[in-house]
Amino acid sequence: MYVIEEEEDILIVDPVETEETLKFWKYKENRVKKIVIILTHEHFDHINGLNYLRDKYACTVISNALCSENITNTKKNLSEYSLLMKMMNEEVGEAGIDILPFVCSPSDIIFRDEYIRKWRGHELRLFSTPGHSSGSICICVDKKILFTGDSLLKRTLITRLPGGNKKDYLTKTTKKMLKLLEQIEIVCPGHGEVDMAEKFKEFVEKG
């Protein structure tokens, strides 16, 4: 989860609910006016804080159409398989999320291929990047920072989950991603550390 603050307005990429984030929102209580939430894709480990925030604050949720549809289904958001995925993660030495199946209401603003929005003087460009999931997108902020969700990681890209499609990634996303990595400065992935764009380019070129 990424949080960008401008006075009393907050922009969130992929809201999650953990002990750490609950402490953060308790500290922010009565100091927040509006929250804009952008979902990079529909998987439960990127949306499991959405219902909490919608109940507590005035939120505007943005995603592409497929993500908006998929978050309403426990199979498509993968929360139905969360226990199995937790066990798989633990086998390779990574932490998993222990969570019951859940759904979210559809997004408030839905787009298909691309959507541009101004937020507190910043330009947000959202564009679909299918491959990891059918509802995956990336977010380019001020042509400098790229939030990639799970569409770009330093480790192997996973396309074998339900809704994933390696052919879509290679034919629809790779060229777009390489062009962006030439222009932006910083990549903020869905998992792993933030780093310079050049560090991620080699991975995309290898496919």
Image (tube, rainbow, N blue to C red):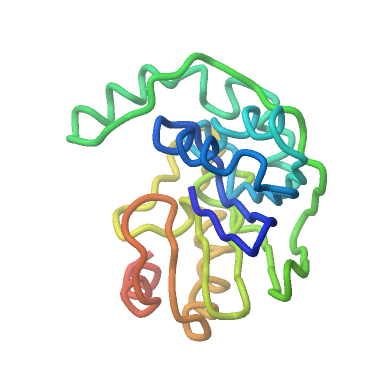
On screen, residue 110 versus residue 87, left or right, reads right
View extreme (top): residue: 100
In this rendering, is residue 91 above or below 127? above
| Residue 34 x/y as whole percent | 74, 49
| Residue 2 x/y as whole percent | 50, 53
Seen at 75% across and 60% down, the residue is 113
Question: Which of the two residues, 124 or 3, is positioned nearer the viewer here?
Answer: 3
Question: Which of the two residues, 150 or 124, is positioned nearer the viewer here?
Answer: 124
Q: Which corner quadrant of the image does residue 139 belong to?
A: bottom right
Seen at 71% across and 42% down, the residue is 66
On screen, residue 62 versus residue 161, left or right, reads right
On screen, residue 19 versus residue 78, left or right, reads left
In this rendering, is residue 122 above or below 4? below
Question: The C terminus is located in which quarter?
Answer: bottom left
Q: Which corner quadrant of the image does residue 125 belong to?
A: bottom right
| Residue 122 x/y as whole percent | 69, 74
Seen at 62% across and 28% down, the residue is 52
